[in-house]
Image (spheres, rainbow, N blue to C red):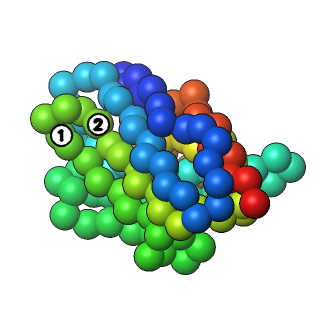
Amino acid sequence: QVRLVESGGGLVQAGGSLRLSCAASGRTFSSYAMGWFRQAPGKEREFVAAISGSGDNTYYADSVKGRFTISRDNAKNTVYLQMNSLKPEDTAVYYCAARTAYSGGYSNIWSYGYWGQGTQVTVSS
């Protein structure tokens, strides 16, 4: 069982930055690939970024590539999402998730079995 708690969301102006954190419980954190997803009002939850268990490999949605950076610190059981050059369309609830199945690639929402409660990010124009 893995418990995930996100933090770091808030209100920021367009062009600004935020760093989200996701703290995980448990002693097997490094064995899980981790992902960030987001869900805007009236829209489906979508993939943002993912990172392998070792941190050696990262993956991004085209919409955030070059602006967002995912990283992890396995000693602290924490995964981060650094968000720069934020746009109003980045407004959403952001969720971190631990990957528990290995099908469909890192962007496959159904391959993630543990989820946090989400943190709101609002970007004003």
Task: Identify the residue at image location x=18%, y=40%.
Answer: 74
Q: Residues within 10 Å of mark 2 (few under 14, many from 20)?
A: many
Residue 21: percent from left, percent from top? 39, 38
> Who's the residue at 40% across and 54% down the image?
82
Name the disc covering residue 49, or none: none
Question: The N terminus lies in which quarter of the figure?
Answer: top left
**Front in this rendered view, residue 17 or 90:** 17
Gap between marks 1 and 2 measured at Cα: 6 Å
Instruction: Point out residue 11 in the picture as x, y percentages from the top left corner.
Output: 64, 42
Q: On residue 78, which mark appears?
A: 2
Position of 82 with respect to 89 (left or right) is left
Helix, strand or loop at mark 1: loop
**In the image, residue 40 above or below residue 75:** below
Residue 46, position as x, y percentages in the image: 64, 57
Q: Residue at x 36, y 46 (%)?
A: 80
- Tell me: residue 91, above or below residue 61: above
The quadrant the C terminus occupies is bottom right
Tell me if I can see residue 80 in this picture. yes
Q: Give the labeled residue for mark 1.
A: 74
Say left or right for 114 vs 37: left
Compared across the picture, whether 62 is left or right of 73 comes to right
Query: For the point 73% across and 53% down, which residue is it?
Result: 124
Label 1: how many Cα within 10 Å (few below 14, some 14–19, many 20+): some
Q: Residue 88 falls in which quadrant of the image?
A: bottom right
* In the foreground, 4 or 33: 4
Say whether residue 97 is visible. Answer: no
Q: Given the image, on which type of amino acid does mark 2 rest?
A: Thr
| Residue 9 x/y as whole percent | 55, 38
Q: Tell how many labels.
A: 2
Query: What type is the residue that disc 1 sits on?
Result: Asn
Vertical side of 21 occupied by 18: above or below? below
